[in-house]
Amino acid sequence: MEKTIDESKQGNNLVLEHKEENSKKLFIESYGCSMNFSDSEIVASILSEQGFNTTTQLEDADLVLVNTCSIRDKAEQTVRKRLEKYNAVKRTNPKMKVGVLGCMAERLKSKFLEEEKIVDLVVGPDAYKDLPNLIAEVEDGRNAVNVILSKDETYGDISPVRLNSNGVTAFVSITRGCDNMCTFCVVPFTRGRERSRDPQSILEEINDLWAKGFKEITLLGQNVDSYLWYGGGLKKNFEKASELQKATAVNFAQLLDLCAIAQPKMRIRFSTSNPQDLTLDVVESMAKHHNICNHIHLPVQSGSNRILKAMNRLHTREEYFELIDNIKRIIPDCAISQDMIAGFPTETEEDHQDTISLMHYVKYNFGYMFTYSERPGTMAERKLDDDIPEATKKRRLAEIIEVQQEHSHLRTRERLGQTVEILIERESKKSKDQWSGRTPQNLVAVFPKENYKVGDLVNVKISDCTKATLIGTAVGYSQN
């Protein structure tokens, strides 16, 4: 998916506080979704116990790991270029070992190890606990691979370290895998079936984060609305559960309630939702708790019913409109963001215009917009010809982006004259004299520092804006 207005992370070298007793050096980079960054924190935690400190210096590393994304070809090509860089450095440091983690590891294991011989270690998303054994194999001169997908939540008992943390915001993984089988998506093949994490371990992690001074968490999953804890196992096996398990099961709306009540001063976000799985009890839970942020990322992918069917998206445009209307009825101030794919196979100009008209109906606050990228192994790759010319894809994407930028500016202008609550996260990228933070609606705001500090909740009077940023002046601390 071609990036435009995009919060997803680019390659980011991740750094952990050093342990004096550790003698080996780990260089780890992550690409793709927030789940990959969360997983890298788990990997760093596991390897910290194996004698590794993280480093920002590639040349000094004993072990180099890249946590990869397979969602589109561009992401895979970026990772390949990084592997070329690693191997160039490795030629001057023969003791260095290079490993691939994540979705590309699962998808391309044989190519990496056998055909291309460019890595020593290949580890899938559910196999990070096996890293100590795999590294031992590599140190004994053998290539190592583990890409077996688990039927249970894999890392609920591991306390992730917080890499490159601002000390204010953190990710908390609650589900893994996806059962939806959208025809364009590799996630079910690279991350497996849906399974959920014990809510008690989630609450313990959130409580620990609050005790350490964090002020906001984002609950993560490929499809958070499918969260269902009934004692462990795949979601698809819930019907086989005992009556007691069913009676005591916790769904996503109930998990939101538990998290909000456990830490009433902690801001809570979640990502990502699927329109076919987002139920109104989730929206009602959001409305009940002031600390659950009024923002839902609700990917639609297309505004055409014909294309939605071809994508195996189990909702229509009309059902999506009904859901949007209900969200706005229950939470009038809720921000909505989107994912959109331009140029899916067989897409006509009429289909494209259906997408444009859907965007005009919703008027999203922001979005992530991409051209279709055929992914090997998906149903779309097997059954559909990638028949839309690249020039047409890019032109349609440009039109989608133009509409989104218009709506983004409309949504930021709506805040002019308002006082909004901002959690200060960092210094502004454009001025060392300003703070940057986000509203509950996930809008970025900047304002003069004065005597405030990172982690403060501040009320800010908005006086100006761009398409993506609110500009204002702090008028005091928030009482929330």
Image (cartoon, rainbow, N blue to C red):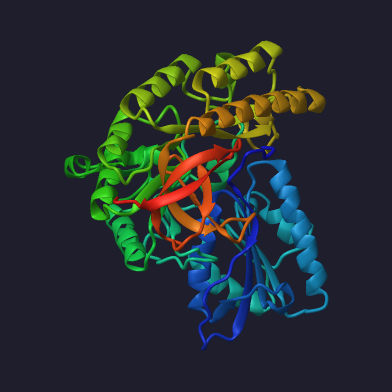
Question: 59 or 17, which lies in front?
Answer: 17
Residue at the (75%, 49%) spot, across then down: 77
Vertical order, 265 against 226 (above or below): below
Q: Quadrant of the N terminus?
A: top right
Q: In this view, does 452 lie to the left or right of 97?
A: left
Question: 315 or 148, which lies in front?
Answer: 315
Image quadrant in which you'd find residue 135:
bottom right
Vertical order, 107 against 362 (above or below): below
Q: Position of residue 35 (x, y in %)?
A: 51, 51
Q: Position of residue 212 (x, y in %)?
A: 36, 68
Q: Is residue 291 left or right of residue 32?
A: left
Residue at the (76%, 22%) spot, across then down: 388
Residue at the (50%, 22%) spot, across then down: 362
Image quadrant in which you'd find residue 250:
top left
Specify the farthest residue to the top: 350
Q: Position of residue 384 (x, y in %)?
A: 69, 24
Residue at the (46%, 37%) spot, across then down: 179
Q: In this view, does 74 lie to the left or right of 92?
A: left
Specify the farthest residue to the bottom: 21
